[in-house]
Image (tube, helix red, strand yellow):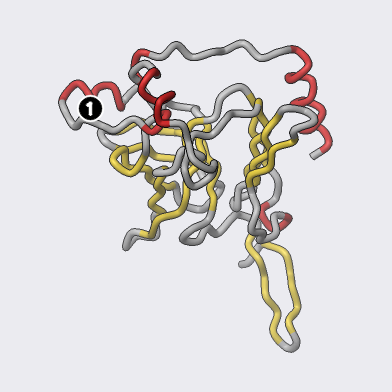
Amino acid sequence: MLCGVVEPMNKLVYVRALRARPEIGDIIISHVIQVAPKRRRLEINFSQDATLMLPLMSLPDGIQRRRTAIDELNMCSIFEENDSICAEGRGFQHDGCLHLQARSQKYGKFRRGQMLTIPPYLEKKRKQLFHYLCQYGIDLILGCNGFIWVGEHVKVRDDMVEDLSNKSEQQNVKPWNEEVEETHTPLETRQYICRTANAI
């Protein structure tokens, strides 16, 4: 029995599944459902869950890891259960499980926003998935798996995204495990986030 959207192609009848079918290189928005040593299991709106290995991710502000026992403990606090994250498809295991990676600073944990879910067949392939609505001060990220993130704008520290990042600023930044996370979002920004989410 098949369940999906029928797309006739000449004499061929193609049924697109209702759940997403990720591919290598896709931008995947997901949330953590299980915390395991050196890895996280993620829900990606697919028939199987995905896996994110901690060595395949970058630290906030591009800080280099020092692979020690203390670093291993600190890495466990980065992604906790129910955290929403953005990553890139890296490859498939023999059992069909998708491996993710988050080596760029534009990937990682989402903060101060909300995640939406739409039918994956409504999501069309496009080159640009990261959108900054400057008039509202919010980010709109379209995942290839039917998940959409709407949240407060975050400045990205990445040479691939921004031209000539200021290295002197990174020297003045506190260690990633000592930074205090800002949780305050202006009321106007929160209203824009809710209105954009309702429009979607």
What is the x, y in percent for residue 58?
37, 37
What is the x, y in percent for residue 17?
63, 62
**Residue at screen point 30% across, 27% down:** 75
Which corner quadrant of the image does residue 10 belong to?
Answer: bottom right
Residue tagged 1: 72
**Residue at screen point 73% across, 82% down:** 9
| Front residue of 199 and 162 | 162
From the viewer's perspective, is 117 left or right of 73? right
Query: Dot 1: few (<14), some (14–19), or many (≥20) neighbours within 10 Å?
Result: some
**Residue at screen point 38% across, 18% down:** 172
Which corner quadrant of the image does residue 32 belong to?
Answer: top left
Q: Is residue 160 above or below residue 116?
A: below
From the viewer's perspective, is 124 left or right of 53? right
What is the x, y in percent for residue 54?
31, 38
Of helix, strand and loop, which one carries label 1? helix
**Residue at screen point 47% across, 43% down:** 159
Q: How many marks?
A: 1
Q: Is residue 107 visible?
A: no
Hey, what amino acid is under mark 1? Glu
Q: Is residue 159 above or below residue 32?
A: below
What is the x, y in percent for residue 84?
53, 32
Quarter of the image containing the N terminus? bottom right
Which corner quadrant of the image does residue 178 belong to?
Answer: top left
- View extreme (left): residue: 69
